[in-house]
Amino acid sequence: MEYIQTAIAFITGGGLFAIISIRYTSMTAKVDAYSKMENFWQESNEKIRIEFKLQIVELERRISDLETKECKRIECKNRLKA
């Protein structure tokens, strides 16, 4: 829509207006691209954080299982058999 307005202004004699509006259009396009890129990175970071939290929970569970099932006494019931 902005390109159509710019073209019409240029054709009808608004050359200076056309140059300014083209510059403004390109600047808004850059801002939109940067905001989309930032949103993408925020979503990616959130997914990675969730994955790390799940991995931490799993590792903590495995550590607690090892701590309860590992005993140095040979006759202990909780000792893992190798």
Image: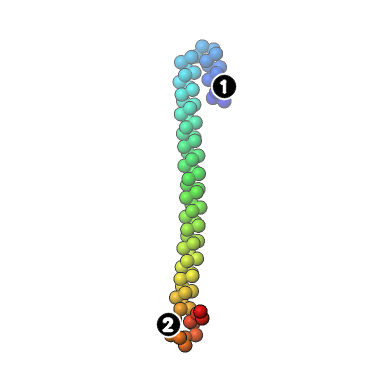
Q: Farthest residue toward the bottom?
A: 75
Q: Residue at x 47, y 38 (%)?
A: 35
First along the sequence among labels 1 and 2: 1
Of residue 31 and residue 44, the one placed in the foreground of this image is 44
Where in the figure is residue 65, as x and y percent of width and height?
A: 48, 74
Quarter of the image that includes the N terminus? top right
Q: Which residue is drawn at 47% across and 50% down?
A: 45
Amino acid under disc 2: Lys
Q: Which residue is drawn at 50% across and 61% down?
A: 54
- Asked if residue 13 is positioned above or below residue 23 in the image, the reply reads above
Could you tell me which secondary element the residue under label 1 belongs to? helix
Between the residue at mark 1 and the residue at mark 2, the CA separation in whole angstroms equals 80 Å
- Asked if residue 41 is positioned above or below residue 9 in the image, the reply reads below
Q: In this view, does 53 lie to the left or right of 1?
A: left
Where in the figure is residue 40, as x and y percent of width and height?
A: 50, 44
Q: Label 1 belongs to which residue? A: 4
Where in the figure is residue 72, as x and y percent of width and height?
A: 42, 82
Where in the figure is residue 73, as x and y percent of width and height?
A: 43, 85
Q: Residue at x 55, y 18 (%)?
A: 7
Q: Label 2 belongs to which residue? A: 72
Q: Farthest residue toward the top?
A: 13
Q: Farthest residue toward the front?
A: 82
